[in-house]
Image (spheres, rainbow, N blue to C red):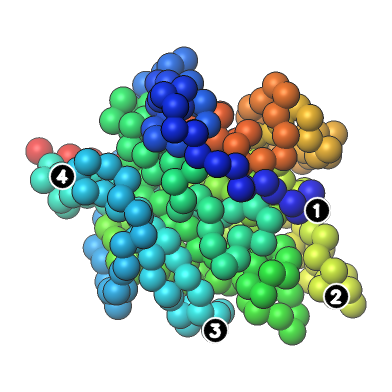
């Protein structure tokens, strides 16, 4: 389950330029995805609290340009004060972020996690998937929200940490759910409520995204979960059964259901040829419902690969966007 193919070459033919596809080589047809509906957020009186950048501001290095408007993926190194871990983060703000009518608005944050080790590079920042170009196009069409995308490293030293604080190991759960959001709040205009915070991840990153939202639903409202593991399986849990159970999405889902909320929204993507099909469908059947809302996008002939999941990313982003808070223009 942990291996995720990311090395496919970028096509240079126009085949990759279907509706909503951006500049990547994968064919992504978002023409059937509808425009977002107006919806009420959780925020008090429907007025979300904008959180201005509070610093310390990061020094960014350009990584790649994503649009003719000058938008870029940038990168920096961030020291997590709560985890003690220092790692690379890539980030992108949508074109709307710099438009005058949104100058006083917050923006929703999507923390995007890769599969495999996700170290030392988070491949969602790269050109092959063109995630940022696609979000720019889909949000312009009104099909998804214009997310700020924050892409941290996942598994330092190429070990699997299950996005968790395993005793005696780097605190990667704290890094992902505390330090990475602190990075976003330090540098960008965000929202104070969970309406503005979501995860997306594939494979091992999908497990981390799923677990983060189920464990901390007061902070994160939604996740896109692609071909995930549904149980913790790091060998470093050996000798720590109680801690492992506390990071098991099944246990967390039972707890959340027993508490009756808060409500969370999980969009699963799954290739029909993946070995994980039975496990993921079993998880959806047995552990979602009540306050745990879920939908499944199954990709025909899809395999365990980011190149499979990008095909339905517009659908998944649309689905969670309907539950979240977008930017509000000045009046």
| First along the sequence among labels 1 and 3 | 3
Label 2 CA crowd tier, 10 Å (few <14, some 14–19, many 20+): few
**Disc 2 vs disc 3: Cβ atoms closer than 8 Å?**
no
Point out which mark residue 231 bears.
1
| In the image, residue 151 above or below residue 283 | below
Q: Residue drawn 60% across and 42% down? A: 8
In the image shown, does 125 or 30 lie closer to the viewer?
125
Q: Secondary structure at mark 4?
A: loop
Q: Give coordinates of residue 310: x percent, y percent.
A: 55, 35
| First along the sequence among labels 2 and 4 | 4
**Disc 1 vs disc 3: Cβ atoms closer than 8 Å?**
no
Left or right: 266 in relation to 94: right
| First along the sequence among labels 2 and 3 | 3
Which of the 4 image quarters holds residue 89? bottom left
Spatial distance from mark 1 to mark 3, Cα to Cα?
A: 26 Å
Point out which mark residue 84 bears.
3
Spatial distance from mark 2 to mark 4, Cα to Cα?
A: 50 Å
Point out the residue furthest to the top here: 32
Q: Give coordinates of residue 315: x percent, y percent.
A: 51, 27
Label 1 CA crowd tier, 10 Å (few <14, some 14–19, many 20+): some
């Amino acid at each position: 389950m942990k291996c995720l193919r990311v090395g496919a070459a970028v096509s240079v033919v126009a085949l990759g330029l279907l509706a909503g596809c951006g500049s990547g080589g994968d064919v992504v047809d978002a023409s059937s995805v509808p425009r977002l509906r107006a919806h009420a957020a959780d925020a008090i009186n429907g007025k979300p609290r904008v959180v201005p950048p509070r610093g310390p501001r990061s020094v960014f290095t350009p990584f790649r340009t994503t649009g003719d408007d000058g938008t870029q993926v940038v990168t920096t190194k961030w020291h997590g004060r709560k985890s003690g871990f220092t790692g690379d983060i890539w980030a992108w703000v949508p074109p709307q972020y710099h438009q005058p009518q949104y100058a006083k608005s917050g923006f929703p944050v999507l923390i995007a996690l890769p599969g495999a080790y996700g170290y030392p590079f988070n491949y969602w920042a790269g050109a092959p998937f063109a995630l940022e170009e696609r979000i720019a196009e889909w949000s312009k069409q009104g099909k998804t929200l214009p997310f700020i995308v924050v892409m941290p490293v996942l598994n330092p030293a190429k070990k699997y940490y299950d996005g968790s604080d395993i005793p005696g190991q780097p605190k990667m759960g704290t890094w992902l759910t505390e330090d990475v959001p602190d990075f976003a709040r330090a540098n960008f205009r965000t929202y104070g409520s969970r309406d503005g915070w979501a995860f997306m991840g594939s494979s091992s990153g999908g497990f981390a995204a799923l677990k983060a939202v189920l464990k901390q639903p007061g902070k994160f409202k939604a996740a896109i979960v692609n071909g995930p593991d549904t149980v913790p399986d790091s060998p470093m849990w050996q000798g720590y059964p109680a801690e492992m159970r506390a990071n098991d999405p099944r246990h967390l889902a039972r707890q959340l259901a027993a508490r009756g909320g808060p409500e969370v929204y999980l969009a699963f993507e799954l290739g029909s040829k993946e070995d994980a099909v039975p496990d993921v469908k079993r998880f959806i059947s047995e552990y979602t419902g009540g306050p745990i809302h879920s939908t499944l996008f199954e990709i025909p002939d899809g395999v365990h690969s980011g190149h499979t999941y990008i095909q339905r990313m517009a659908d998944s982003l649309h689905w969670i966007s309907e539950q979240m808070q977008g930017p509000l223009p000045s009046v």
